Amino acid sequence: MSRKPIENSHSQLTGFAIAVVVAMLVAACGSGRATSSPTSSGLASAAASIAASASPTPEPTPTPTPTPTPTSAPSPTPVPATLMPAVPITLTAFATGLPNLIGISTAPGDPRLFAVEQQGRVVIVSGGKVTGTFLDISARLAFGGERGLLGLAFHPQFATNGRFFVRYTDPSGNLRISEFQVGSNPAAANPASERVLLTIPHPNFANHNGGRIEFGPDGYLYIGTGDGGSGGDPNNHGQSLATRLGKLLRIDVDHVDPGLAYAIPPSNPFVGQADSAAEIWSYGLRNPYTFSFDRLNGDLWIADVGQDAYEEIDRATAASGGGRGTDFGWSFMEAGHCYKPGSDCIKDGMTLPLAEYAHGSGDSIGCAVIGGYVYRGHLHPELAGRYFFGDYCSGRIWDVTAAGPASQAPQDLLQSGLRITGWGQDSSGELYVTATSGVIYRLA
């Protein structure tokens, strides 16, 4: 299909026979409508509904206790800063039977995979087998469309303190970040241990809720938030520093400031500035459903889901400030192209994407970017130093050179035939892909 104005986008999406799960991808659609009700099930209902219709000066960042390097994995090997040629890749089924699967998380030094299911469960996968339910909060959240359990991150000292964090939409549709702890059984969380850290109002539209949460190499928790929904950012949240929507947030979960359940890192770029949310780290984002940090050098990678025409990959190197105070352009820009206004826009002060791709006719190339990780494993040295990402609609997988220049053309490596919903990496740096099929695939 060809892309239409906001109110008509995805009018021909039925060609995908939308059968499944993760909600966030409606975010790619640019729809002016809210997604389906929380009683609907995942992406299937959401997509069916749609088918019917200036940066501060950087300063040094304090470093809390760093994430320990797993003793079982060798240190990643750097690769030269030259563009890498395309390489053949394959996906091999690793684990099955995981409904509404949207991604994978791991705890530092822990060989297990923790599969995140949008309806509210976290399931342990070990040796390619589902070995039990780690957490079930399905009764506490709104599930359907782009809502549900959307993110999971383990504290850097999880092995000793048992703390981990989840991100979900509450029954009112607001964005919630909560802390849990494991119980007496290390294979299961204590569901009564929930401590709500942060609730972000999201009252008007059900889409663009963001997704992944990650601990950075600085020990702080990073949270990607969508722009609040509908299409075209009608409230201009992406460029407003007064709201925590359309941002990458950064908080300190190991300390508490007065009136908060967490602390604001003093080096956050807008601390003390009037009419600015102190949690903001980066802004100008539409729906950063997936982002990650390079485990070798701490570089930040953001896959920001686009509006009607383009998907983008953003890189903020640790050496340049790691995205501190960076404006990634939305909604003045969609990827590297003018959006508001549609031409002759002013790009000064904005950071343009490292890579982008157009949707193509009928979304044949893609409609919603699903960001992965820089490969730092050791089983496949030919993949080292490549950042991998995919697209939900087309199932294509691309890479770019992690240490390469700030503007690159994505290399199309594989047409998987899957509806890709997420990525994960294990404690050794090997990469995995999740899909609406309920299968975890291993990248090789």
Image: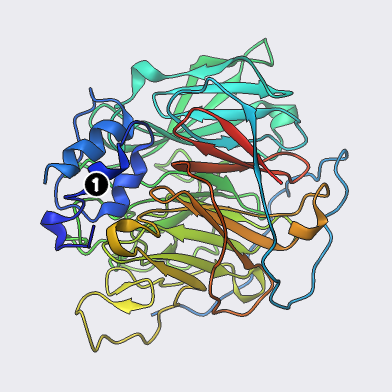
User: For the residue labelled by badge 1, is the local secondary structure a helix, a strand or a loop?
Assistant: helix
x, y (%) of residue 209?
Answer: 33, 45
Vertical arrangement, residue 163 with respect to residue 280, above or below: above
Q: Position of residue 308 (x, y in %)?
A: 26, 62
Query: Is 62 or 337 nearer to us in this picture?
Result: 337
Give whichever of 251, 313 is nearer the camera: 313
Q: Does residue 279 show up?
A: no
Residue projecting furthest to the top: 184
Q: Residue at x 45, y 23 (%)?
A: 99
Query: Pointer 1: what residue?
Result: 13
Q: Is residue 322 above or below residue 97?
A: below
Q: Percent position (x, y) of residue 49?
A: 17, 38
Q: Looking at the image, is 435 positioned above or below residue 269?
A: above
Q: Is residue 78 left or right of residue 190?
A: right
Is residue 126 shown to the viewer in this render? yes
Residue at left offset 23%, top offset 50%: 229
Q: Position of residue 400 (x, y in %)?
A: 61, 67
Nearer to me, 395 or 287: 395
Image-based side of 144 in relation to 429, left or right = left
**At 35% across and 16% down in the image, what residue appears?**
139
The image's colour scheme reads rainbow
State the residue at coordinates (38%, 77%): 336
State which quarter of the image contains the N terminus: bottom left
Query: Left or right of 226: which side holds 84?
Result: right
Q: Nearer the viewer, residue 23 or 213?
A: 23
